[in-house]
């Protein structure tokens, strides 16, 4: 049975996290071909751009959680992929791929550069920022549904937040698995809806 997210989408109490929507992850030259294919199939970038426009009009708090990496591999997640990447000698600060257009952050929005972990909260200033803004419902967006969106959802719930997910503003690999994630995992953790519904709720709240 679908649940109505509207009671929990007061724009003054909502926050959006844009997760890893970077050129290296979902851009034209991404090596994650399956992930990029699902992004394109779902129209995720355009859908998310519209959601961000609606959020900015409604005064919703927006944060970006971007993947960064040090050339020497320091603090990289202990995953098989990271374990098997050759480490380079130390060579300066962490490198961060830019956010794809038209999703780039505005100057006043929070941008987190994350060199460790697989989700938005661990080792980042996201939680105190949300608390400072009075956020009680988090809307994770971006990629991937396979790991980052699920992990961020679980982290948010563990911190006493509700989670609402716009299905058309996330993507994963393969597309069929993303639908399984919605049906069998996220359906039990978050209010599932779409970006246009969320924006309409925010517009109604301003009338």
Image (cartoon, rainbow, N blue to C red):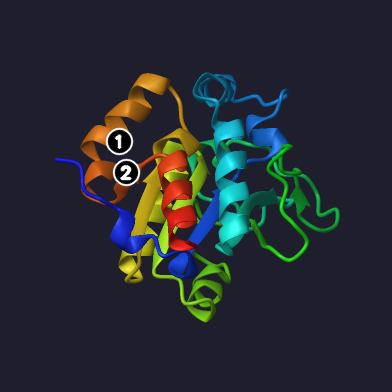
> Is residue 150 at least partly visible in the picture?
no
Quarter of the figure with residue 1:
top left
Q: CB atoms at circles 1 and 2 under 8 Å apart?
A: yes
Q: Secondary structure at mark 2?
A: strand
Q: Position of residue 169 (x, y in %)?
A: 49, 38
Vertical position of residue 94 compared to residue 103: above or below: below
Q: Which residue is mark 1?
A: 182
| Whole-number angstrom distance, CA of label 1 to CA of label 2 | 8 Å
Dot 1 falls on a residue whose secondary structure is helix
Side of 143 where 20 appears, left or right: right
Q: Is residue 72 above or below residue 125?
A: above
Residue farthest to the right, as pictured: 91
Q: Left or right: where does residue 199 sit relative to residue 124?
A: left
Q: Which mark is residue 192?
A: 2
Q: Picture coordinates of residue 199 (x, y %)?
A: 48, 48
Q: How many residues crowd mark 1 within 10 Å: few (<14), some (14–19), many (20+)?
A: some
Label 2 CA crowd tier, 10 Å (few <14, some 14–19, many 20+) = some
Is residue 40 in sight in this rendering?
yes
Mark 1 or 2: the one toward you: 2
Q: Nearer the viewer, residue 203 or 99?
A: 203
**Residue located at (62% from left, 40% from top):** 49
Report the disc number at residue 148.
none
The residue lying at 20 percent from left, 42 percent from top is 2
- Whichever of labels 1 and 2 marks the residue nearer the N terminus, that label is 1
Residue 97's spot in the image, x, y percent? 75, 43
Q: Residue furthest front?
A: 207
Q: Name the residue rendered at 55%, 45% in the picture.
A: 51
Q: Where is residue 5 drawn, in percent x and y?
A: 30, 53
């Amino acid at each position: 049975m679908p649940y109505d997210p509207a009671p929990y989408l007061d724009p003054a109490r909502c926050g959006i996290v844009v997760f890893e929507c970077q050129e290296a992850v979902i851009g034209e030259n991404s090596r994650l071909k399956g992930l990029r294919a699902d992004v394109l199939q779902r129209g995720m970038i355009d859908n998310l751009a519209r959601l961000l426009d609606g959020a900015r009009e409604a005064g919703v708090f927006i944060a970006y959680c971007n993947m960064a990496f040090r050339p020497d591999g320091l603090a990289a997640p202990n995953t098989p992929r990271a374990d098997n990447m050759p480490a380079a000698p130390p060579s300066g600060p962490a490198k961060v791929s830019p956010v794809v257009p038209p999703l780039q952050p505005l100057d006043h929005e929070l941008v987190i550069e994350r060199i460790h972990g697989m989700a938005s909260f661990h080792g980042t200033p996201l939680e105190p920022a949300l608390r400072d803004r009075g956020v009680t419902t988090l809307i994770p967006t971006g990629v991937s549904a396979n790991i980052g969106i699920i992990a961020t959802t679980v982290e948010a719930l563990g911190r006493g937040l509700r989670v609402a997910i716009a299905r058309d503003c996330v993507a994963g690999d393969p597309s069929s698995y993303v639908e399984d994630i919605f049906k069998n995992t996220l359906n039990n953790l978050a209010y599932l809806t779409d970006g246009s519904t969320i924006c309409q709720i925010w517009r109604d709240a301003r009338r």
